[in-house]
Image (cartoon, rainbow, N blue to C red):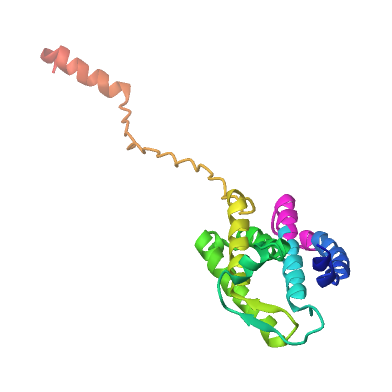
Amino acid sequence: MDALLRAFWGMIPISAIALPYALLAWPLLAARRRRRMPARRASATAAVDCAAILVAFLVFCLVTMPVGDSAESTLDLVPGADIAAAVSSDGSLWQVIGNVLLLCPLGALLPLRIRRLRMLPRIALAALVASVLVEGTQYLIHTGRVTSADDILLNTAGATLGAALSRRGWRWLDASPPVPVAIPLPRRTICTAPTLTLRVPRSVWDTRYAAIAHPERQ
């Protein structure tokens, strides 16, 4: 544990500086998003985005921080070698735990905002690519770290684990579908043909009735 703290002591002041900026950006981003979405969803999405950016920044600082007095990076591509050494009595299990937890927060947060990553195989593939880039960067900038195949496998497993733990809440921040509105059908009005009423004067009816009733008078 003491060796781990000595190796990564620089992350303490970096985290202390970055955290207030993330807390300040959260309400500002939420206030901007309230113009086009409900207040609760705006605050939640802003919190997730700020947390993801903060974690990504800390991961970048962590993997680029020099370790030890050596300026050369070493390469170890034998799978399982570092894990076996860490589990042994002379090794440090904290290294394995740290590699698992490195991308675990991003694996839990990114599916909340990126719908294309809402599948565990896709999360694993994205974490694998990101871990390869991280390990390759460590080897190229020569920070005294060990570029290991086990680190790539542990980082991928950690991101997949984080995605699996947050799987039930992937749709929590999605916009709710619009409520269907029932539109009443227009009433059909049946037009009736106008009736023509002829008004015959009474004198005409009297004349016809007299002709029918008393034909002898004609």
Q: Residue furthest front?
A: 89
Nearer-the-camera pick, 22 or 89: 89
- Provide residue 2's location: percent of width, then percent of height: 84, 64
- Provide residue 154's location: percent of width, then percent of height: 61, 65
Q: Residue furthest left?
A: 216
**Residue 122 horizontal side relative to residue 130, left or right:** left
Our reading of the magenta stretch's main secondary structure is: helix
- Provide residue 86's location: percent of width, then percent of height: 67, 65
Q: Is residue 60 above or below residue 176?
A: below
**Residue 194 horizontal side relative to residue 114, left or right:** left
Q: Is residue 40 magenta?
A: yes
Q: Is residue 100 magenta?
A: no
Q: Quadrant of the C terminus?
A: top left
Q: Is residue 182 above or below residue 131?
A: above
Nearer-the-camera pick, 71 or 189: 71
Residue at 53% x, 45% y is 180
Quarter-of-image position of residue 36: bottom right
Quarter-of-image position of residue 110: bottom right
Nearer-the-camera pick, 81 or 203: 81
Nearer-the-camera pick, 195 or 52: 52
- Provide residue 127's location: percent of width, then percent of height: 59, 68
Q: Is residue 55 above or below residue 141?
A: above
* Segment tinted magenta in the rendering: 29-47
**Residue 35 visible in the picture:** no
Quarter-of-image position of residue 28: bottom right
Q: Quadrant of the N terminus?
A: bottom right
**Residue 138 visible in the picture:** yes
